[in-house]
Image (spheres, rainbow, N blue to C red):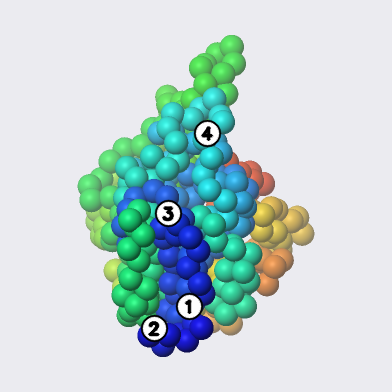
């Protein structure tokens, strides 16, 4: 009912220790988990049924509060292996059911404990179907999430924080999640125990190609997939110059995923990418890297109302007609009508027809919007790493 807040606030349930307040004044009461703190960000939803730890540590989620549509989050616990970056960039998480005790042989700690160690707040007891429908129909809102174990929740202040947060459009977040120094990557993909090696990640022993990966927010499993394909990977910061890249004498350059508005990151990244393309350097881009390749070729990008986030998105390869089930996480998209004639759309989303892949005609250059490296899956698009290596072989 209307009250001193100036907007509708539902009755507070007994024992509530957390609240999610949207910029439009919508209030969701719940029960806190993780860190006792307040975080502000864009509220999105993810439809994946597995891989919540990988999702929370994906650098592309910087600035976002993640609503999980799958109700059982936390039941496999947490560990130090299933991470995409050391410091989780997400702002918080929204759940339907409370986190339960872990029940998985690889778990080393409770998810609640893991969240606390990374200063990540969460809220459970939310009608996530209602919140997801709201995002689906009206777009991703800004929101403030507060976990207060003593129940002291200042709804008016949370509303102010959400309403005043500027949003992701125009925001360059790649600099925040990128590495600060150049480093080598040699770890390969996870393998289960067999007669030759124990369970776990491997090490690249016989590199065939040298690849420089520009880190706009690179996921570790992308680097592992490159290493598994025989690439000796040198990771460089997002702001690296052309000279910084070429001094490593790469056979190819990888443009990583990352968060924020590609047009903002493109201010310093696009001139470098354009030079690489003009030099006929083999280039492979994923997610943000895909969007910035489009910008470098003269195209434009735009903010999506709700974005694509989940592990069940169908994408059609226009060249073969094959449909791949893909993992996705993006809130911006390449605008197809802005692409020049020498850029071909190779993949499209079967959900909404948006651009999911590009190639530059006459150049060893291509990109995809989805994540072929997805861990724990799906793995339908792993062949793209082989395609990149084949391009370097033909150069």
Which label sits on residue 32?
3
Of the two numbered discs 3 and 4 on the same chain, state the one appearing first in sequence: 3
Query: How many neighbours does mark 4 have within 10 angstroms: few (below 14), some (14-19), or many (20 or more)?
Result: some
Q: Which residue is mark 2?
A: 5
| Mark 3 or mark 4, whichever is nearer to me | 3
Q: Are marks 1 and 2 in contact (CB under 8 Å)?
A: yes
Residue that badge 4 annotates: 102
- Judged from the image, the secondary structure of the residue bearing numbered disc 4 is loop
Residue 308 vs residue 121, the one in the foreground: 121
On screen, 276 above or below 3? above
Q: Are the residues at dot 1 and dot 4 in contact (C-beta closer than 8 Å)? A: no
Neighbour class for label 3 at 10 Å: few (<14), some, many (≥20)?
Answer: many
Cβ atoms at labels 3 and 1 below 8 Å apart: no
Q: Are marks 3 and 2 in contact (CB under 8 Å)?
A: no
Circle 1 SS class: loop
Determine the residue positioned at 51% across, 17% down: 198
Label 1: which residue? 9
Q: Whole-percent x and y of residue 225?
A: 50, 40
Residue 376 percent across, percent down from the top left? 57, 41
């Amino acid at each position: 009912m209307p009250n001193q807040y100036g907007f509708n606030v539902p009755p507070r349930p007994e024992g509530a220790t957390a609240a999610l307040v949207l910029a439009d004044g919508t209030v969701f009461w719940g029960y806190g988990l993780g860190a006792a703190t307040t975080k502000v960000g864009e509220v999105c939803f993810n439809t994946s049924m597995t891989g919540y730890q990988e999702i929370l540590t994906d650098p592309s989620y910087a600035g976002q509060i993640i609503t999980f549509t799958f109700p059982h989050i936390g039941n496999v616990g947490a560990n130090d292996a299933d991470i995409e970056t050391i410091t989780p960039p997400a702002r918080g998480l929204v759940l339907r059911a409370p986190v339960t005790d872990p029940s998985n042989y690889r778990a080393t700690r409770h998810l609640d404990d893991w969240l606390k160690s990374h200063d990540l707040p969460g809220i459970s007891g939310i009608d996530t179907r209602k919140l997801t429908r709201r995002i689906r129909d009206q777009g991703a809102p800004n929101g403030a999430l507060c976990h207060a174990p003593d129940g002291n929740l200042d709804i008016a202040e949370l509303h102010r924080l959400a309403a005043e947060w500027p949003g992701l459009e125009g925001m360059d977040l790649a600099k925040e999640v990128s590495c600060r120094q150049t480093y080598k990557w040699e770890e390969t993909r996870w393998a289960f125990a067999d007669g030759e090696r124990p369970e776990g990640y491997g090490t690249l022993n016989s590199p065939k190609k040298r690849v420089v990966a520009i880190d706009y927010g690179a996921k570790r499993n992308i680097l592992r997939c490159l290493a598994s394909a025989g690439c000796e990977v040198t990771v460089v910061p997002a702001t690296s110059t052309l000279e910084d890249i070429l001094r490593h004498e790469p056979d190819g350059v990888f443009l990583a995923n990352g968060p924020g508005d590609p047009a903002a990151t493109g201010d310093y990244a696009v001139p470098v990418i354009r030079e690489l393309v003009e030099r006929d350097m083999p280039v492979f881009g994923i997610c943000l890297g895909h969007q910035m390749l489009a910008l470098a070729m003269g195209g434009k990008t735009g903010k999506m109302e709700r974005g694509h986030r989940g592990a069940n998105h169908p994408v059609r390869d226009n060249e073969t007609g094959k449909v791949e089930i893909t993992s996705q996480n993006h809130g911006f998209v390449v605008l197809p009508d802005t692409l020049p004639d020498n850029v071909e759309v190779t993949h499209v989303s079967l959900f909404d027809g948006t651009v999911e892949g590009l190639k530059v005609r006459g150049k060893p250059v291509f990109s995809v919007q989805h994540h072929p490296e997805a861990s724990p899956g799906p793995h339908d698009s792993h062949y793209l790493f082989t395609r990149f290596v084949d391009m370097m072989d033909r150069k």
